[in-house]
Amino acid sequence: MRLKTSNHPLIHQGGSVLLEVVLALALFIGAATVISAGISASVDAVHRVRLQTHAANLAISVMSEIKIGARPLAAIGPENLEAPFQEWLYRVNLNAGEVAVTETDATRAVEVMVWHTQENIVHRITQHFRASDFARAEGNEVPP
């Protein structure tokens, strides 16, 4: 028994067209995967930067409230921030550093730490306060 082979060019072209279509589809799927992975990484990075910026803003706000007297100059925390920031915690640490003596007054470092309860975002800010500010906070008035 002898098999018939065809010398017709359309039969050979049909197989090569199918191979080209499969290869093009594979390249398209690969490119789509790379692009979607890049977009996903970018979205995650934007979300993380947004949370880090939000943590920095909240820490600066807490430190500013301490400076103007809206919050006590005392070790506090960890406590939740007020609504709508319940998912954020903060702590005020008065032992953030040693007492630094300058020409005019001694200073102590006050550290405010803010972190998110679900994400791994932490921001710390430290500022030096004069010893007279601590005395006023404790109720001992110091003459200027």
Image (cartoon, rainbow, N blue to C red):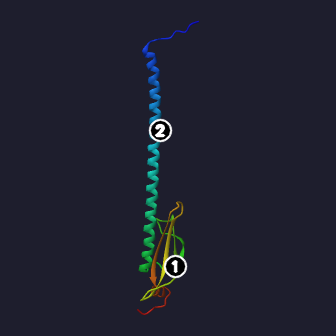
Residue at x 43%, y 19% (from the top left corner): 13
For numbered disc 1, what is the local secondary structure? loop
Given the image, on which type of amino acid does mark 2 rest?
Answer: Gly
The quarter of the picture where residue 3 lies is top right
The image shows residue 4, relative to residue 136, as above or below, that is: above
Of 131 and 89, the residue lying toward us: 131
Residue 30 is marked as 2
Q: In x, y percent, where is residue 43?
A: 44, 52
Given the image, on which type of amino acid does mark 1 rest?
Answer: Gly
The image shows residue 23, relative to residue 50, as above or below, that is: above
The image shows residue 2, relative to residue 76, as above or below, that is: above
Q: In x, y percent, where is residue 16?
A: 45, 23
The image shows residue 89, relative to residue 8, as above or below, that is: below
Q: Earlier in the sequence, mark 1 or mark 2?
A: 2
Q: In x, y percent, where is residue 62?
A: 45, 73
Query: Badge 2: how crowded within 10 Å, few (<14), some, or many (20+)?
Result: few
The quarter of the picture where residue 60 lies is bottom left
For numbered disc 2, what is the local secondary structure? helix
The quarter of the picture where residue 31 lies is top left
Q: State if disc 2 and disc 1 touch (CB < 8 Å).
A: no
Residue 97 is marked as 1
Residue at x 43%, y 63% (from the top left corner): 53
Residue at x 44%, y 86% (from the top left corner): 102
Mark 1 to mark 2: distance in Å? Answer: 54 Å
Query: Badge 1: how crowded within 10 Å, few (<14), some, or many (20+)?
Result: some
